[in-house]
Amino acid sequence: MPTAVVTGSDSGIGHAFAKLLVDEGWKVYAVDRNEGEGLKSLSPKAHTAHLDVTSTSSIEKFKALLSGSNGSTVEPIDLLLNIAGIASSDDSLSTSTLAVFQKTFAVNTFGPFLLIQALLPNILASPTKQIGIVSSRVGSIGDNSTGGNYAYRSSKAAVNSIGKSLAMDLKTQGVTVLLLHPGIVRTNILPAEVMPPDAVEPEEAARKLWENVVKGKGIGETGTFWHREGYELPW
């Protein structure tokens, strides 16, 4: 039975992805800093745990769960999905602040890197070795035609850069790193009143990312950026 770790599993895409992988027969560690009803509902089919990706102590505590009692063994992770993310409604040219940037980058950019760094021994212990980082098309510099969303946009551009560097550093060790654009999804990342009418449900986004991208991509596609519909996006 393959093993996956899915961050942001209390709600939205993370919750939908954790459920999907359980249904696909995976052993799933569903984690989130919010231990709400969404996360609780995944148990006992999934292993649920608290994980705040902005906290190194929280990351280390979770890492210990995947190690032997004396830390001498590690549980292989076949797929690490970094899905947890945030956005701020105060993220325009006139309203964004240092605090908005720091909070957004802590979750969207630093969090995935620090978690991957901590769990790398577990990933390397797997025969498949796959990492997915949920980014966003707004992080594409070449595709930016609207501006705005300064902290969110730049946090996703930065995590794209991190993902590309990870892919280059880890390619010889057989680790596949994929950057994933789920599209506009009905989650709590945006208030309902500003949600675009063409937004899809989290279940559709997770299913298409799985079927069109994650399930079928390997080391030949490492370090690339994908739309949920299965086509590659520009940086």
Image (cartoon, rainbow, N blue to C red):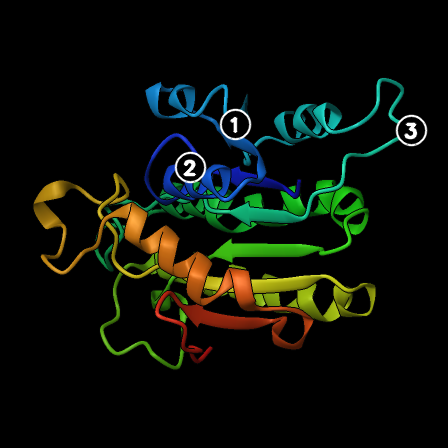
- Judged left or right of residue 211, residue 223 is right
Q: Name the residue under label 3.
A: 72
Q: What residue type is labelled 2?
A: Lys
Q: Name the residue under label 1.
A: 46
Q: What residue type is labelled 3?
A: Ser
- Circles 1, 2 touching at the beta carbon (< 8 Å): yes
Tell me residue 231's x, y (percent).
Answer: 41, 77
User: Mark 3 Cα within 10 Å, few/some/many (few <14, many 20+)?
Assistant: few
Q: Residue 19 carries which label?
A: 2
Q: Could you tell me which residue is drawn at 45 percent across and 70 percent down? A: 226
Q: Nearer the viewer, residue 82 or 138?
A: 82
Classify residue 205 by image quadrant. Answer: bottom left
User: Mark 1 Cα within 10 Å, few/some/many (few <14, many 20+)?
Assistant: many
- Judged left or right of residue 146, residue 141 is right
Classify residue 135 by image quadrant. Answer: bottom left
Q: Which of 146 and 69 is in front in this view?
A: 69
Q: Could you tell me which residue is drawn at 31 percent across and 47 percent down? A: 203
Q: What residue type is labelled 1?
A: Ala
Q: Could you tell me which residue is drawn at 50 percent across and 25 percent down? A: 45
Tell me residue 218's x, y (percent).
Answer: 64, 68
Q: Say whether residue 135 is visible.
A: no
Ranked by sequence position, the earlier of labels 1 and 3 is 1
- Judged left or right of residue 93, residue 207 is right
